[in-house]
Image (cartoon, rainbow, N blue to C red):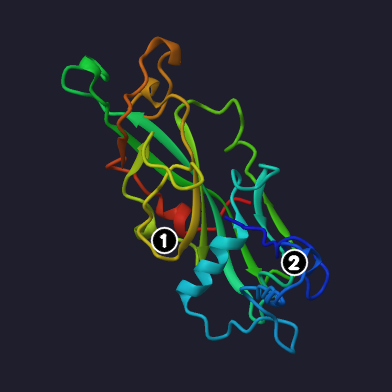
Amino acid sequence: MAVLFTGGCSSAQGASPYGDPSGSATGGSDSPSPSPTPSLAPPYPTEASGCHDNTAWTAEESGDWVRRFIDTPKENYEGDGVKVVSLPGYNGPLCRKITVQVEFWKLVYGVANSPDGDRLADGTRPDYYFDIRRVKRTELHVDASAERKIALPASLYATDRSPCEGALVSVTVGKPLMSKELPKEVEVGGGKDLWGRATVDFRSQRVADHELSEPSAPQVCSPDGKPTADPADLPTPGYEPTDLYPTPDHSFDLDDIFGSPTP
């Protein structure tokens, strides 16, 4: 998402990036002078105050900026946190800081009981349920003047976490997400974005970015999200995406949503 900007190959001032054609002229009519190479203006140029004026930005414009310059774990080359990129002269700094919420969510998946008790009979896709709870929230006020990094919750991203657990990070402009803005459905093995990340449909335009870490083997999970077998003993879901629906009786924990987040 964060795209490093390069202005092209280095060359002497006023010279063509393709070389000076005058050195190969052999007489006759003069060759036309090469046109000067235009300099590429940064997308967020700074003014006399030393910052880029964003005081009149809409929420959509703020979200577009956040989407460009905050890296989620898979986008971050180090891969161990959420990173706020600082590229002075390219992404600012901004004159007015943008409030951003970085929220980490724990997803617990369970397979619904089918009438015949066979979760994957005849190659059909199982129905999954998930329970979503926020485990960490960090509020940032960003303007690209400095690089920031938010560590991942260790237990949520542990290599030995339960095969029934997934992790979701959301990057939101403004206030923390409310329960009505969280996704109604999540897919296992569903659509991917340009960066190869699983797509999740939040019910809010304030979510600038997100990243889903899927459960490793939801097909072995009981309806209450507990592993009941070795993943090698049950077939994995088919190629088609599997819809996940919130657990009907406790899909959202309002105390988690509106209470103080766990540090």
The residue drawn where x is 47% and y is 52% is: 256
**Residue position for label 2:** 21
Q: Residues within 10 Å of mark 1 (few under 14, many from 20)?
A: few
Q: Measured along the vertical axis of the image, is residue 14 above or below residue 132? A: below
The x and y percentages for residue 253 are 40, 49
Q: Measured along the vertical axis of the image, is residue 65 above or below residue 169? A: below
Please tell me whether mark 1 or mark 2 is closer to you in this view.
Answer: 2
Q: Nearer the viewer, residue 54 or 215?
A: 54
73 relative to 211 in the view: left or right: right
Question: What number is the disc on residue 217?
Answer: none
Q: Quadrant of residue 233?
A: top left
Q: Measured along the vertical axis of the image, is residue 41 above or below residue 49? A: above
The x and y percentages for residue 102 are 57, 57
The residue drawn where x is 74% and y is 89% is: 48
Residue 174 seen in the current view: no
Residue at the right extreme? 12
Q: Earlier in the sequence, mark 1 or mark 2?
A: 2
Question: What number is the disc on residue 178?
Answer: 1
Q: Nearer the viewer, residue 221 or 201?
A: 201
Q: Amino acid at mark 2?
A: Pro
The residue drawn where x is 49% and y is 52% is: 210
257 relative to 2 in the view: left or right: left
Q: Residues under labels 1 and 2: Cα distance? A: 63 Å
The residue drawn where x is 56% and y is 68% is: 65
Q: Are marks 1 and 2 in contact (CB under 8 Å)?
A: no
Q: SS of the residue at dot 2?
A: helix
199 relative to 21 in the view: left or right: left
Q: Nearer the viewer, residue 216 or 78?
A: 78
Q: Quadrant of the N terminus?
A: bottom right
